[in-house]
Image (tube, rainbow, N blue to C red):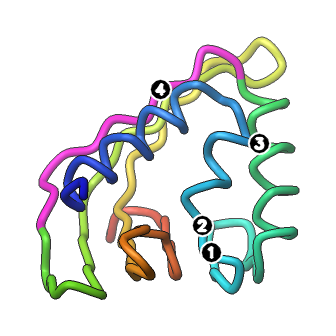
Amino acid sequence: MKKIQEIFNDYLDALASQNFESAIAFFHDDATVFFREGSYYGKFQIKMILQNTFSMIKDETFEVDKLTWNYQTDSVATCTFEYMWTGTIQGKRFTTPGRGSLTWVCNDGNWQIIVEHFGPMPN
């Protein structure tokens, strides 16, 4: 069975691919996602926001720094991190720093995200 750190890295690779089908596979059916622009509940809503985001943003990178695994058991893991999100929307370049947290659950050896929260850095 893959370790949670490997699964996290695979998730980052899926995000980098901008393939929403690859990325959505990491989410639990009952997952909740909190982004700056809204809250999304369940795999269908999360798939729609990923699809929309990936279609708008070109040349996207998502770099993670200061990753901390806060809690880990055989069935639950949580992590926090800082990120730098960069890309192009309608020809305009952007860079957005922020911080995130993920809560993972493991069912039958399959780690999935149950809660994801990305937000701005504190002032």
Q: Give me the C-alpha separation between circle 2 and circle 4.
A: 20 Å
Q: Give me the C-alpha separation between circle 4 and circle 3.
A: 13 Å
Q: Nearer the viewer, residue 115 or 100?
A: 115
Q: Nearer the viewer, mark 2 or mark 4?
A: 2
Residue 33, label in figure: 1
Q: Say which label, 2 or 1, has the lower sequence index.
A: 2
Bin the neighbour count of mark 4 within 10 Å (Cα to Cα): few under 14, some 14-19, many 20 and up. Answer: some
Residue tagged 2: 27
Q: Say which label, 4 or 3, has the lower sequence index.
A: 3
Q: Position of residue 42 (x, y in %)?
A: 77, 80
Q: Quadrant of residue 75?
A: bottom left
Q: Say which label, 3 or 1, has the lower sequence index.
A: 1
Q: Which residues are magenta?
A: 58-68
| Label 2–label 3 contact, CB within 8 A | no
Q: Give me the C-alpha separation between circle 4 and circle 1.
A: 19 Å
Q: Quadrant of residue 58?
A: top right
Quarter occupied by the N terminus: bottom left
Q: Give me the C-alpha separation between circle 2 and circle 1.
A: 10 Å
Residue tagged 3: 53
Look at the image and say whether residue 92 sits in the magenta stretch: no
Residue tagged 4: 61
Amino acid under disc 4 = Thr
Q: Say which label, 4 or 1, has the lower sequence index.
A: 1
Q: Nearer the viewer, residue 26 or 2?
A: 2
| Label 2–label 1 contact, CB within 8 A | yes
